[in-house]
Amino acid sequence: MLDKLGESLKDSLRKLLKISLVDKKLVDELTSDIKKSLISGDVNLELATKITESIKKRALEEKPKSGLTHREHVINIVYEELVKLLGAEPGKFEIKEKPTRILLVGLFGSGKTTTAAKLAKLFKKQGQKVCLVQTDTWRPAAYEQLKQLSEKINIPFYGIKDEKDPVKIVQKFEPDYSRFNVVIFDSAGRDALSAELTTEIKKLNQAVKPHEKLLVMSGDIGQAAKAQAKAFKENIGVTGVIITKLDGTAKGGGAISACAETGARVKFIGVGEHIDDFEDYEPKRFVSRLLGLGDLQTLLQKAEESMKKEDAEALAKKFIKAEFTFDDLMKQMEALQKMGPLSQIMSMIPGASMAKIPPELMQVQEGKLKTWKFIIQSMTKQERDNPDLIEGSRIRRIAKGSGKPESEVRDLVKQYNQMKKMMKMMGNQKQMQKLQKMLGGKMPMGL
């Protein structure tokens, strides 16, 4: 997420990790690099200047905390200041009432309808009984889109096709809402927050009586998020913000920092195109990932959604200790695909993104995983446990048994060995693990 901003910040920290002496010249270079990174991430110039001046002042004047080197102390300062910039405390979402009513508002193109489905899926995974209500009577395809998304995630849908009054839709299904823990209302948008849109949302607000009014904004609008968040907050009284389209956009830093500046709490973020690419916004964990310090808490949550808890913990231990076999790899392939793109998963492991992992290792497609599964299934138990045995006649036999070229078998063995080497390297990065613990990350049992 926020690829350009994150990579730029990690480059700054890599320079710091290579140098033993932290002096004024190094701090000046580091803060200059960070300032450039933030501006390229569309963070307001004044805010970027303010945060880098604070980093510089603290790095030169504060004494390191007990147990930390000066270098680790500076990294901690960068982390703390970025957390302040991007929200400090999480905008926690609590379900207190039954049903808790959520009204989504926002402009055209912000991704409200898709976000409604993603939010519903997130609550469903948490064990909540959820339904979706379509009240966007302006966009012709809104009814069909939300209906199809509801069917895809198997969540009850309410709406009236061709009805032009959103209040009538809300009132029609009022008796049904008490059956659910959470009811999500998807509203209409416009090109701007006009008097017409304000009037419509205020009427809808009176009919829905929402416990939460969440403003949905696209991460690619950057600094413009400030004016939008302020306008919606003043006119409609939004209780929180959802930032969408944070995958691969440098401007997401601008959107999040702009919201923090207005006091509008970001509660959820969309980090990809898939329905599961959606999560609670936790500034500390978010910044930890941006800096390459990992986010094992989210990683384990994702793993536990895809497999049993004890299996998730065992997998985390094996991979980080580089003790996984082909059997482990095969058993977890389906779970891995459910957890999201490999690059996203690796960003949650402390030190992984600091290690400059080759792009080819991060772009394992679904087809490649299927090929690997066929090949692994054609190996003997001894071969799956001892990949060093796989050469010559064994490669030919495995290729024939799997129906795949010998080159694919060699490629799998090569990739497997590279993964183990990479994980060993990361496992030896004691400094990264130390920083992760210092920043409050929960390491899996046994690490």
Image (tube, grey):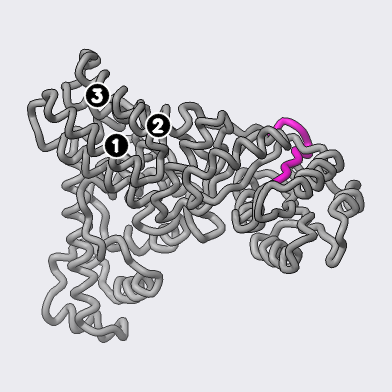
Residue beneath the point at 64% across and 43% down: 215
Residue beneath the point at 80% across and 60% down: 137
Residue beneath the point at 91% across and 47% down: 175
| Quadrant placement of the C terminus | top left
Identify which amino acid the numbered label 2 is placed on: Leu
Distance (Cα) linking label 1 and label 3: 11 Å
Q: Which residue is mark 3?
A: 56
Q: Residues within 10 Å of mark 3 (few under 14, many from 20)?
A: many
Q: Answer yes or no: is residue 393 visible.
A: yes
Mark 3: which secondary structure?
helix
Q: Which residues are magenta?
A: 95-104
Residue beneath the point at 58% across and 48% down: 217
Towards the viewer: 281 or 150: 281
Identify which amino acid the numbered label 3 is placed on: Lys
Residue 346 rendering spot, x and y as whole percentages:
32, 51
Towards the viewer: 154 or 289: 289
Residue 85 rendering spot, x and y as whole percentages:
42, 31
Question: Mark on residue 35?
Answer: 1
Identify which amino acid the numbered label 1 is placed on: Lys
Q: Residues within 10 Å of mark 2 (few under 14, many from 20)?
A: some
Mark 1: which secondary structure?
helix
User: Magenta stretch: residue 99 in it?
Assistant: yes
Q: Which residue is mark 2?
A: 47
* Residue 106 versus residue 87 in the image, above or below: below
